[in-house]
Amino acid sequence: MNKYRSHNCTNLRKEDVGSTVLLSGWINKKRDHGNLLFIDLRDNYGITQCIIDKDNSNFSSLEKIQLETVVKIEGVVVNRSKETINIEIETGEIEVKIKKFEVLGSCKELPMPVFSDQEYSEEIRLKYRFLDLRRKKIHENIILRSKVISFIRNEMNSYGFLEFQTPILTSSSPEGARDFLVPSRLNPGKFYALPQAPQQFKQLIMVSGFDKYFQIAPCFRDEDARADRSPGEFYQLDLEMSFVEQNDIFNVVEKLLINTFKKFSNKKLMYEKFPKISYSEALIKYGTDKPDLRNPLIINDITEIFTRNDVSFEIFKKLVNKGSKARCIVTKNTKDKPRSFFDNIDKWAKEQGFSGLAYFTIEKEKEIQAKGPIGKFFSKDALEEIMKKTGAKIGDSIFLSCNTQKELEKITALARDKIAKDLELIDENIFAFCWIIDYPMFERNEQTNKIEFSHNPFSMPQGDIEKINFEKPLNILAYQYDIVCNGIELSSGAIRNHIPELMYKLFSIAGYEKQQVDEKFSGMINALSYGAPPHGGIAPGIDRIVMLLAGEKNIREITMFPMNQNAQDLMMNAPSKIDENQLKELSLSLKLKK
RNA sequence: GGGGGUGUAGCUCAGUUGGUUAGAGCGAUCGCCUGUCACGCGAUAGGUCGAGGGUUCGAGUCCCUUCACUCCCGCCA
């Protein structure tokens, strides 16, 4: 028998009554009745109630023992009387009568309690993460994460994918996020970069003829944190396939995600076949390329209404005249909502830094009319036209905004969420997946006015390559796609451009000389010129998948050892200063800002 | 880089229009208690009210500066 335990803390049942057992674990909770002491012993698997009374010579030392001390307990399994059975825990029908005990790991006074459902400041949780991780909810989240990852691995293997590792020390890339840099001792003045994603490597794997690759890949981007974005590092299910079209990727990923979500969650899937929404359609209907499809509200463009002579809402008319657009959100049957409902939304819009949200309600007494502060500006005919365009019915309300297209997309997207929340239109028990497709290859940077890659420079443009009009780059679409679930972007992917000449052409549009491309992407470009297969892939974010499955809103709740918002590890004290010798070896010197 | 929120005992929080000695629960220490499972009861210790400056007879409370944490914007091919 093992020296520490014969059973773990969830093993023992009625059938074990009478046997002498050895348990090891943490003191989760003590209940001291003076002459009788209950101890809840906890390990990874569960809790077993142990009991000792004053007749035992160990009583007084156990009575004084600190919570979270690690002990080994030897005792006999006994039945609990009917009244004292605890159905909350799996071992609740029995308890262990303590004979002997031994402290395996003593515990100082706790900076935070482990046995408690209370919430604690992140600062203390992260500093004492090893204590925090003992707590039930987060302990279970981390176990869930492990199970999800091994499930995904098994699925991918069963689909015929091979798992490969790719380098962590690689080269800096000019596109995308800020790189984490690592100085090279052997090459003074030169730096490695940590990979933002194994993008080039996975393409090289395809060129190497491996056909189907995947990896649970760490990705490093030096960008500021958000609730759903760790600073520094995160994990992707990186995958790539050869001789595929967009739909082949979709089929694999849909199958994987549906299987995963069905296995690990009881929530319903809104679509078993993910709907495909084009980027441009998404921006109009939802104001964003990551729409929450649980939200039934749709945005409609009604710019034309404000060119009519029988509409006298002059503020909007002037803006439309200058090139602004007008869009609206219809809410069903809200005519009896109190004035405060509408005013709160308008007030909220102003707090978001917009000029507010105008609104009216469509009613019919003798004839159709608009009620509300701006109702009087719309004629009956104009209202009927709006109803036709938006599908609004009598009794519905319309929230509208007028602005430049970019700003309008922003506010309508936010307003769509806000109004749905206020009206409680979102079913939290649903996962609504969709594909966003047909991303533009390029976009214009509004500040510099330059043409840039809008997503991934390695994506394949759509259409017959011979016939692409490179004179109008903003019209070129790419085989580039995203998966969105409940308004969270899970991944993006693309069919890759495997034709070097086409690559040079596209890079030249974005302002890169051939020589620069050769320099920055030498490995890739070179490889593509030695017989590259058509290929494509995608990279779903593991952290966000686990977040959705665990029902958590913060990525730190499903990350074992996360950094704080300032990219510091409070437990390990990273980042930290290094000594002069280390700098010297790397040929570095510091020039700190005061 | 910018905006919002928070900061009071080891932990979670309360603290009135500025007014005696800053409170509670959990935890800690000590005592009582033989069937609890958030055990119960009693007592004790524990505070630079994030820090610095200012207004005031008097500041946890008002003002300024600053720091930390967090949420958001920018950023995230």
Image: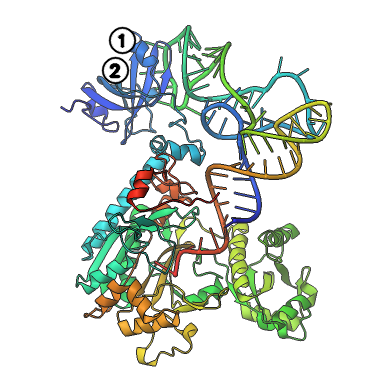
Q: CA distance from mark 2 to mark 1?
A: 8 Å
How many marks are shown on the rendered structure?
A: 2
The answer as to whether the residues below labels 2 and 1 share one chain is yes
For the point 23% across and 74% down, the residue is: A207
Mark 2 and mark 1 residues within 8 Å of each other at the beta carbon: yes
For the point 36% across and 33% down, the residue is: A89
Which chain is indicated by disc 2? A
Please tell me whether mark 2 sits on a helix, a strand or a loop. Answer: strand
The correct choice, above or below, for A119 with respect to A56 in the image is: below
For the point 31% across and 36% down, the residue is: A45
The correct choice, above or below, for A100 with respect to A511 in the image is: above
Which residue was labeled with disc 2? A98
Looking at marks 2 and 1 on the same chain, the residue that comes earlier in the sequence is marked by 1
Q: Is residue A67 left or right of residue A301?
A: left
The residue furthest left is A1
Q: In the image, what residue type sits under mark 2?
A: Ile
For the point 47% across and 29% down, the residue is: A111
Which residue was labeled with disc 1? A56
Please tell me whether mark 1 sits on a helix, a strand or a loop. Answer: loop
Kindly tell me whether residue A535 is visible in this rendering.
Answer: no
Residue A412 image point, x, y percent: 61, 68
Which chain is indicated by disc 1? A
**Residue A327 quadrant:** bottom right
Tag of residue A194: none
